[in-house]
Image (cartoon, helix red, strand yellow):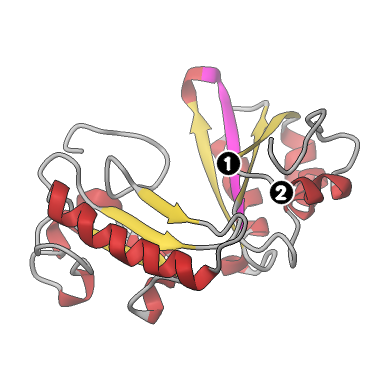
Amino acid sequence: MEHHQGGHPRIGAVDVIPFTPLKNVSMEECVLLAHAFGERYWQETGIPVYFYEEAALRPERKRLEVIRKGQYETLKLEVLSNPERLPDKGSAALHPTAGATVIGARNFLVAFNVNLGTTDVSIAKEIAKAVRASSGGFCHVKGIGLALEDRGLVQVSMNSLTTERTPSTACWRPFGWKPAAGASRWWRQNSTVWFPPRLFSTVPPIIFKPPDSTHDR
């Protein structure tokens, strides 16, 4: 971690491990799994653990961005003197090479990323601000603007945390917004991690729909 650099917020080499109730398991069981796993993870690796979302032990730590504030570089210093930044499991010092890991229990999260054909990262950041809940955008949506320097593009990286209330497809709307339409062109979008098949019926034709999607694949 002392040498790692990147555009995405992180506090550890293994940054986040979520437990998600897919089938025949409750959220309460996932919380218990997260806590048991976090204890064992710390004991066996020596990497400090923070619990988030439904497994959070402090209300403010439900939000991942609160734990990640300042990223690894800031956390490794503040954890030594600020009790508010102490891990939930582990010593008051981050692992010298692996940092810390955030473990939790949450519902489906859909990562929805849109690449823009421009090198102006301010456009991506402005759209991300319009999208994310913390700045008045869509409820239960997080978003950041990133530069993909090796590809000559910028990206709006979004997470839809509660797809039943705010479908990830709603995040598509700001890309017809003037700053995006006037200064760049939509390049490519992709969806990562688990994407519940029931959501595909809400996806506009412009967005790629994987063929033969089922609850098993």
Q: How many marks?
A: 2
Q: Quadrant of the N terminus?
A: top left
The location of residue 67, given as percent across then percent down, is 33, 63
Choose between 3 and 152: the one closer to the eye: 3
Q: Main secondary structure of the magenta part?
A: strand
**Label placed on residue 117:** none
Helix, strand or loop status at disc 2? loop
Query: Which segment did they paint magenta?
Result: 151-160
Q: Quadrant of residue 48 in the image?
A: bottom left
Q: Residues within 10 Å of mark 2 (few under 14, many from 20)?
A: some
Residue at the spot x=42%, y=68% of the render? 31
Instruction: Check disc 1: other Cα within 10 Å, few if <14, some if 14-19, many if 20+.
Output: few
- Measuring from the top left, give residue 192's x and y in whole percent: 60, 38
Report the amino acid beneath label 1. Answer: Val
- Residue situated in front as seen by the camera: 169 or 26: 26
Asked if disc 1 and disc 2 are in contact, CB closer than 8 Å, the reply is: no
Residue 147 horizontal/vertical position (percent): 50, 33
Is residue 88 rendered to the left or right of residue 180?
left
Q: Identify the disc placed on residue 196.
A: 2
What's the CA distance linking mark 1 and mark 2? 10 Å
Depth check, front residue: 199 or 149? 199
Where, by quadrant of the figure, is residue 38 drawn?
A: bottom left
